[in-house]
Amino acid sequence: MNQKTQGRLLQWAALFLFLQSIILTLSPAVRERSWDVDYRFSHWIGFSAWGILTYIAHRSLTKSLPERDTFLFPLASLLSGWGILTIWRLDEGFGLRQTAWLGLSTIVFVAAVSRLKSLSLLKRYKYLFLSAGLIVTGLTLIFGTNPLGFGPRLWLSLGDLYFQPSEPLKILLVIYLSAYLAERVKIRLTSLPLLIPTIVVIGLALLLLIVQRDLGTASIFILIYTVFLFIASGKRRMLLATGAFLLVSLSIGFYFVDVIQVRVMGWLNPWSDPTGNSYQITQSLLAVANGGVLGRGLGIGSPLLVPVSISDFIFSAIAEETGLIGSLGIILLFWLLLTRGLTIALRSPDNFRRYLASGIASYLGIQSILIIGGNLRLLPLTGVTLPFVSYGGSSLLTSYIALYLLLAASNIEDDEPASLRDSRPIPFLAGLFAFGFAACAVTGAWWSVIRGDDLLARTDNARRAIADRYVLRGKLVDSNNRPINITTGKSGSYIRTYYYPDLAPISGYTHPVFGQAGLEANLDGYLRGLQGNPTSLILWNQLIYGTPPPGLDVRLSLDLNLQTTADELLGTYPGAVILMNAETGEILVLASHPTFDPNRLDSEGEMLTQNESSPLLNRATQGLYPVGDVFLPILEAKFPGEIPFNSRLITLYEESGLFRTPSITLPSVDYTLPNSVEDLRASPLQVCLAAAAISYQGILPAPRIATAVNTREQGWVVLPALGEPRVLLPPEAAKEAAFSLIEEGGAFWSHIATGNISKTAVTWFLAGTPPDWQGAPLAVVVAVEKHNPALAERIGKSLLNAALDR
Amino acid sequence: MSGAVVLALRLLAAVALYGFLAWALIFLFREIQRQAVALAVRRVPGLSIMVESPGGHGVLRYFNQAEITIGRDPGSDIPLSDDTVSARHAHLVYHHNQWWIEDLASTNGTMLNKLPVTIPTVITSGDEIQCGSIGLSISLSENVIIEPTQRLDKQTHSQ
């Protein structure tokens, strides 16, 4: 029965890891949505090595420790195998190294299991062990280094090998405390014998914190010591006292130790500085959110976005790729490990084993709760490793030594448990740890399920940009289906190509670094396939790929022929041109100069944001120019033969829609009421709507630029205008105004105006088809940023002629 | 297509992970069951106790359970209706392969072979116990009583 348990559990572990390995092999095919890819095979080395090493250790355990606990080894083995596959998925080089470390750890483990079945040696040489550990840790103060070349210098290096002595020091401390306390029958908190270990532990913690900046290990030392005092004395106030002590030292440390300040601020308010000090934690939460319930599948998520995902943040990497199911699983595995450890403690025939087992179990429990809680923002981040799972030779070796100690302590041959002086401490501890793990599980569910969608919709979620490389984004086409912005390349290296760069301030861009702008931003839902596609398709794609489905094409009302004409006419002059169908509100031309080339954002993007002529600004809808006397024709039509009061002027401007943002799928400015009539400003789009009212029956049309979307099921579906047309003038008055503005022998009405507020000068040119025009009524607005009526008139008239000749 | 295949594998992997956990829980349950069975079939050597009655002739009683309580309380295994006996006076417990006597903080104390019982003490055949003014003499049975039921039998075989 005993042996069967271990074997059967190991078979399940092997099956799980085998399936994960297949998933990792196939993952490139899923990422690129094709069978013709380079599959991943190298991690099978890790899987096979895990299988062989686990088998050897299994055999040796069965032979040497027949009465051991049979759950511990399968639990640890599954965790370390899962760790190796995850590390291999993140970085093949580190995966190979971790496999080598697993080999070394297993050799040490098997040697200990077969040679050192009794733990009495440890008890006898406790001071030797502790001093050796302290000396080696002390050496890091002098010879310490960091494999990364920066950060806390906690490692000792031997050529290319790095070792972190503070890891095994935790175990040595546990052995020392167990032996020390087991020698004393009754522990009083005020007794003198407690002085020595207290000084040792507190001194060690302070040293680690102040000299090494290792917040995690320092708090683990304090917590392990508290657990010992609690078990030995049975006083619950011990825990409260330590809790208070940690809180106080945290708040003192907050002001004096910068690493604490950074960690606490990043914990309390990560979103205030998501790219700086809280970059790690926000990226970790995004990874957990991206995992959802089922996870993306090993190799299919993007856990590499989280810094140090192989060690400190391996839990969020696992949560991203195996989802809530996986993270709950891993929490349950650790909880089982801890519960078994405490059970061993209860069954121990002597106090040394009892202290040792509960100390080791608590060490594993504390460390895993600290780092899982840190990854999930349940606790401030402490840079400790997840036992058995995280990358790191010292950590893995220490975990395996801890496993050996637990197994050796559990190998009890028919001895009655030693009597327990106080029945409360161990069950209370078990409850406390269960509470900690449950809190981790609930927090994990909170970020991955309840808050998941909100987090993923954040613009600083780099996964959106990654999805854009693998999923075809919809095209933007003009009214004759000529491409404007399209996505080119093959899956995995899709890039957005801009066929008509002069339209950049309007059509915008979508870029992994600079984000999105213009129509690309406003129509993102359709272009990304999240709008206009059936919900089932979106959910299915989310489930199997973790990305939206291929995007939908959107047709714009723009006419690229006329647009070219307008862009050529406007040339290098800063300003804007709009040509609109006055009846339907469809925008045929929308030009804003100066412009930029979004194809070259990679190299020029940084300069563009600082360019003083603001080429990124869409002047046609976002530019606000002094109104001047541009509304004179409307004024005259509305109040013939009189000069209206300011209040009636304001009413007119209000009716003309000047104080409102036009409803259109383009970024527009929010308008605020000006201080005075002289201070009034308007965007070219607003002026164009008023011009449209003169051209067509006094109605302000609802502007439209996105006219149709190409859905999968119904083909092109019309996108209705966002606003409603509104009456500005009586049709007769509009007609009269238009006739009065037609020049002698001219084919259309026109009006020139200038606006001037402080140093901003603008020349407006308004024109449109006459009321008796048989074709589609047109309205044009030109705004140039200088006093040059001739230029504005030439641009407007040439464009209108080109449109009428069409 | 590759996505659907891998989705199936991901679901299988989840099943495997929870298969591991489910088996761990099943084994845990079986362990508890086994432990209960092991404790239930633990061999308790029977115990004969001759209880002195005030009239002079004793009553011989035989027990094969692991705990025997003595006291004035009528629910006791050996009820003694004597004013010098406390309600819960003492008990005899079998553990560590021995029968032990423990005084349960009685008013008039328990004596083992004329010596007061202050800590749990091992008893053997021929020992004389005095609870208040009542004397009891112990004799351990040679024949060990086991109570294997059908169900227990089956379980021990299946393991």
Image (cartoon, rainbow, N blue to C red):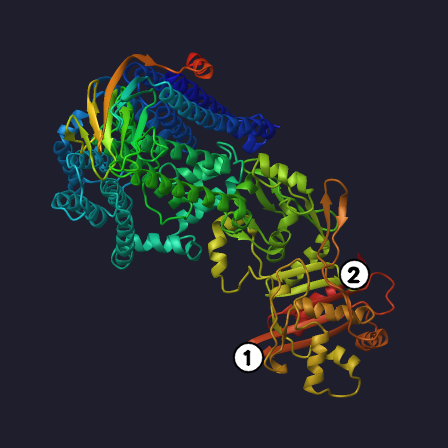
Q: Is residue A289 left or right of residue A398?
A: right
Chain of the residue where label 2 is placed in the rendered structure? A
Which quadrant holds residue A361? top left
x, y (%) of residue A665?
66, 57
* Observer-nearest of A122 and A420: A420
* Observer-nearest of A721 and A794: A721
Give above or below for A276 relative to A792.
above
Query: Of the residues shown, which amino acid type is indicated by label 2?
Result: Thr
Which quadrant holds residue A564? bottom right
- Give the SS element for disc 1: loop
Q: Are marks 1 and 2 on the same chain?
A: yes
Chain of the residue where label 1 is placed in the rendered structure? A
x, y (%) of residue A305?
44, 42
* Dot in front, 1 or 2: 2
Sequence-wise, the earlier of marks 1 and 2 is 2
Quadrant holding the C terminus of chain A: bottom right
Q: Which residue is mark 2?
A: A584
Q: Is residue A249 left or right of residue B27?
A: left
- Give the SS element for disc 2: loop
Q: Which residue is mark 1?
A: A758
* Numbered circle sitting on residue A211: none
Q: Can see residue A39?
A: no
* Observer-nearest of A553 and A748: A553
Give above or below for A647 relative to A589.
below
